[in-house]
Amino acid sequence: MSKLHDDQMVVEILNFFYPNNTISEYDVTDDLGDLAAEIYAEALEASNAMHLVPRPTYTPSFSWLIKEGVKAVWRSKGGDEIYESVRVTVALKYKSEHQMVKLGI
C-alpha cells in the first residue's frame, strides 16, 4: 500500500469520528495514523459487543430470547459497521488526545 493511500485511510477514519474537525492528507502524521488505528480498533470491538445486545420490542418470552440469540449471531457475522452510539462514545473518549496529536503535542 502506498503512503498516500494510507494517509487517505487515516483521513477517512478521523473525519468519520470528528466530522466537524476535518483534516486532509497533508496534515497526517505518524502519530495521527497510530491514533486513527487505535480509535478504529476500539470502535470495531465495541460495535461487535453491541451486536450481542438484545432489542426487545415487547414483553420478552423464551421464544423471543431464542430469536434474539439467532439475530445476534446474524449481526455478528455482518461487516465492519460501527454503531452511531459507539462512534460518539469513542470520539468523545479520544477527543483530547486527538486535539493534542493534531497540534503536535
Image: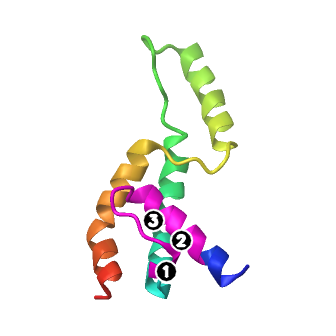
Mark 1: secondary structure: helix
- Frontmost of labels 2 and 1 is 1
Q: Which residue is mark 1?
A: 26
- Is disc 2 surrounded by few (<14), some (14 to 19) or many (20+) residues within 10 Å? many
Q: Earlier in the sequence, mark 2 or mark 1?
A: 2
Q: Quadrant of the N terminus?
A: bottom right
Give amino acid for label 1. Answer: Tyr
Q: Which residue is mark 2?
A: 10
Give amino acid for label 3. Answer: Leu
Q: What is the quadrant of residue 23 in the picture?
A: bottom left
Q: CA distance from mark 2 to mark 3?
A: 6 Å
Q: What is the quadrant of residue 21 in the picture?
A: bottom left
- Is disc 3 surrounded by few (<14), some (14 to 19) or many (20+) residues within 10 Å? many
Indicate left or right for 19 with 43 as reference. left
Q: Which residue is mark 3?
A: 14
Magenta region, residue range: 7-28
In depth, the one of 24 and 43 nearer the eye is 24
The answer to whether the residue labelled 3 contacts the one labelled 1, judged by CB atoms less than 8 Å apart, is no
The answer to whether the residue labelled 2 contacts the one labelled 3, judged by CB atoms less than 8 Å apart, is yes
Q: Does residue 51 sit above or below 5 in this rendering?
A: above
In depth, the one of 83 and 15 nearer the eye is 15
Mark 2: secondary structure: helix
Q: Which residue is at 42% across, 51% downward? A: 87
The image shows residue 51 at horizontal and vertical percentages of: 55, 40
Q: Earlier in the sequence, mark 3 or mark 1?
A: 3
